[in-house]
């Protein structure tokens, strides 16, 4: 079986190696054991159900909530030579009939459907009467009410197990929240599933933050440095989407807007033009991106502060699916905080309001501290990362640091003098000399540290504490009311053996770093991209479906001259070799002769 899996990976998908966890998941599905897998965007989840579909005797049904995505997924599978189809409300009666015909004849390997299909009279019994091998639930977090994207239709899926007691079920999500993950397993009634929680590190993404002064101008400069690359600019309001898009167009960068205020067909049209590389830039509200799997998004710019780290992570995750170096730039200003707070104050549900506040304050401390961005993002998902990733502004000395040893000592000393038994708010109160009953009751107004930090605001001290936490000089005990304790590193600072630096709010932006792998010739790369665009137009497909940027990069490095060496490029499978091999080989040959 192992050999078969590997062979299919090569011939159908054109890849020589599995991505982390893929092989284990696929083996489990083929052995009939349920699977739950949380893997980041770009982790290669589709292959985990598409590959077994080629090897199982019966049909694989994939349940996916995004109708727009469904057609793309089917197109991509067909490009690789997998017989695939979909049924959803967008399909004409004839087309649906055709799919049912293929189903009955047993020719279909892979069928995509939307969850609401299960509510359609007779659909379940239709499935029960065919040779079904595997049901896969993609975007499985939609089943959880704890998730950010809950869909009532997904609740129908909790009955899958009843209807198909003996069929292997797999579930996939890119949601990193542990609570949602367990909820998915319960809701879908997975039987002793293989549980995979992949690392959520996106090593191909470069994270940086700059101080927002003139957003449109800053966005323009960044895009000019990345000309020819495909990117998304996120703005919070429709008005800003329009203004940024118009500004870019005025300055010679063609961009299209995308937001809920546009007419349906205009929105669809803009999304399509972006997906098909007919325009490089889309300026959008955060609703944009869920419906597309475009793998060659090379940068994401956030023109405004996102409301939580979770959303920031998911939105930036839309870049670099193909594994090529991509950039995530955030323009940050304290002013945005006020706007978000204004909305938070209008939230009626009290718990939800508290959650929103917490989310915002985590986001602010992400933006304001000097700690490795990757370390902070991953720690939000309880994943430890040593830091100094080399792929963020903090790790690249782009963040200007100032000495903050004395202020750190003030905080550390306060924590020590109250015997490490209090949380953030209380410590700040002591440092600022607040006159509260609680402090008087404990007699803490008599401490030598009481009031040593009067001169600075609460926000300021919050930031110092965030830095201390981020740099692991103190720790916070979540199980014990969030009390603060001093770590070994913190002690060194307290006793003056070590200094402590804080971020002096942003720096200039180095908008490009060099990739640490071979890039090949840039002119050939542009050339092959053009060829890809032409072929894609002919076929009416998005270019990334023909070959990913990564695959084209590899062609530029390996310069294949024969069918065999072309096939050896990652991402070239048998069917794609036949469809596109000649055109690409000719182009590469021409270039090789010239140079
Ligand atoms: P996800 O659904 O997890 O976000 P996708 O299934 O869309 O990710 O895959 C992301 C990209 O990774 C796609 O371009 C896909 O072709 C590519 N990919 C998947 N598996 C492999 C592999 N084993 N080697 C190289 N690339 C892969
Ligand atoms: Mg996916
Ligand atoms: Zn870093």
Image: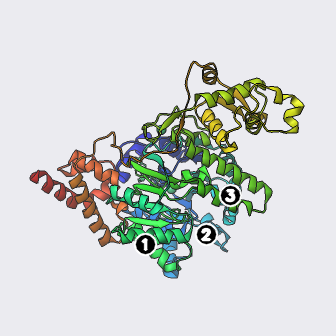
- Mark on residue 126? 2
What residue is drawn where x is 60% and y is 30%?
Answer: 472
Query: Whole-Å distance between the Cαs marked 1 and 2?
Result: 51 Å
Along the horizontal axis of the image, is 15 left or right of 310?
left
In this figure, which residue is indicated by the disc labeled 1? 246
Q: Residues within 10 Å of mark 1 (few under 14, many from 20)?
A: some
In this figure, which residue is indicated by the disc labeled 3? 341
Query: Whole-Å distance between the Cαs marked 3 and 2?
Result: 51 Å
Along the horizontal axis of the image, is 533 left or right of 127?
left
Q: Indicate the colouring scheme.
A: rainbow
**Residue 436 placed where, x, y %?**
85, 39
Q: Nearer the viewer, mark 3 or mark 2?
A: 3
**Residue 542 placed where, x, y %?**
37, 66
What residue is drawn where x is 52% and y is 58%?
Answer: 58
- Which is nearer the N-term, disc 3 or disc 1? 1
Task: Give SS at disc 3.
Answer: helix
Along the horizontal axis of the image, is 528 left or right of 467?
left
Task: Give SS at disc 1.
Answer: helix
Q: Is residue 491 above or below residue 560?
A: above
Q: Residues within 10 Å of mark 2 (few under 14, many from 20)?
A: few
Q: Residues within 10 Å of mark 3 (few under 14, many from 20)?
A: some
- Which is nearer the N-term, disc 3 or disc 2? 2
**Residue 260 placed where, x, y %?**
56, 73
């Amino acid at each position: 079986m192992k050999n078969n899996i590997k062979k299919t990976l090569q011939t159908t998908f054109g890849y020589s190696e599995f991505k982390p966890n893929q092989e284990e998941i696929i083996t489990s599905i083929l052995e009939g054991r349920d699977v739950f897998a949380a893997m980041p965007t770009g982790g290669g989840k589709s292959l985990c159900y598409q590959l077994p579909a080629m090897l199982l005797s019966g049909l694989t049904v994939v349940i996916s909530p995004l109708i727009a995505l469904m057609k793309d997924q089917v197109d991509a599978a067909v490009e690789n030579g997998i017989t695939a189809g979909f049924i959803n409300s967008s399909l004409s009666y004839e087309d649906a009939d055709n799919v049912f015909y293929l189903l009955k004849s047993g020719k279909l390997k892979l069928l995509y459907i939307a969850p609401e299909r299960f509510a359609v009279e007779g659909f379940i019994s239709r499935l029960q009467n065919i040779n079904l091998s595997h049901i896969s639930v993609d975007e499985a977090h939609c089943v959880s009410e704890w998730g950010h994207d809950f869909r009532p239709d997904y609740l129908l899926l909790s009955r899958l197990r009843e209807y198909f007691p003996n069929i292997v079920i797999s579930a996939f999500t890119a949601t990193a929240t542990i609570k949602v993950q367990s909820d998915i397993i319960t809701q879908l009634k997975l039987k002793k599933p293989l549980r995979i929680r992949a690392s959520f590190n996106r090593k191909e993404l470069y994270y940086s933050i700059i101080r927002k002064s003139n957003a449109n101008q800053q966005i323009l400069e960044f895009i000019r440095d990345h000309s020819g690359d495909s990117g998304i600019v996120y703005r919070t309001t429709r008005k800003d989407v329009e203004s940024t898009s118009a500004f870019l167009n005025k300055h010679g960068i063609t961009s299209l807007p995308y937001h809920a205020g546009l007419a349906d067909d205009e929105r669809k049209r803009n999304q399509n033009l972006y997906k098909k590389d007919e325009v490089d830039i889309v300026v959008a509200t955060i609703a944009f991106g869920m419906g597309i799997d475009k793998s060659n998004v090379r940068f994401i710019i956030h023109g405004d502060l996102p409301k939580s780290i979770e959303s920031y992570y998911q939105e930036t995750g839309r870049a670099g699916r193909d594994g090529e170096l991509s950039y995530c730039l955030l323009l940050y200003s304290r002013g945005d905080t006020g706007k978000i707070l204004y909305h938070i104050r209008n939230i009626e549900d009290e718990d939800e309001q508290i959650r929103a506040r917490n989310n915002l304050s985590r986001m602010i401390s992400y933006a304001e501290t000097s700690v490795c961005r990757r370390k902070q993002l991953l720690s939000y998902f309880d994943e430890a990362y040593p830091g100094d990733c080399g792929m963020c502004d903090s790790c690249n000395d782009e963040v200007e640091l100032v000495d903050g040893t004395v202020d750190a000592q003030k905080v550390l000393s306060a924590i020590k003098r109250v015997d490490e038994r209090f949380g953030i708010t209380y410590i700040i109160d002591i440092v600022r000399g607040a006159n509260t009953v609680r402090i008087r009751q404990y007699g803490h107004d008599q401490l030598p540290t009481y009031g040593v930090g009067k001169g600075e605001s609460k926000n300021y001290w919050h930031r110092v504490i965030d830095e201390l936490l981020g740099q692991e000089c103190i720790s916070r005990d979540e199980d014990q009311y969030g009390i603060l304790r001093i770590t070994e590193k913190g002690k060194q600072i307290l006793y003056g053996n070590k200094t402590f630096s804080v971020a002096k709010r942003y720096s200039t932006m180095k908008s490009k770093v060099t990739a640490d792998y071979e890039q090949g010739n840039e002119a050939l790369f542009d050339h092959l991209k053009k060829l890809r665009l032409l072929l894609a137009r002919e076929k009416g497909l998005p270019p990334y479906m023909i070959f990913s940027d990564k695959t084209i990069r590899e062609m530029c490095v390996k310069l294949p001259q024969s069918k065999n060496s072309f096939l050896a490029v990652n991402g070239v499978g048998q069917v794609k070799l036949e469809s596109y091999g000649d055109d690409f080989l000719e182009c590469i040959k021409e270039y090789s002769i010239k140079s």
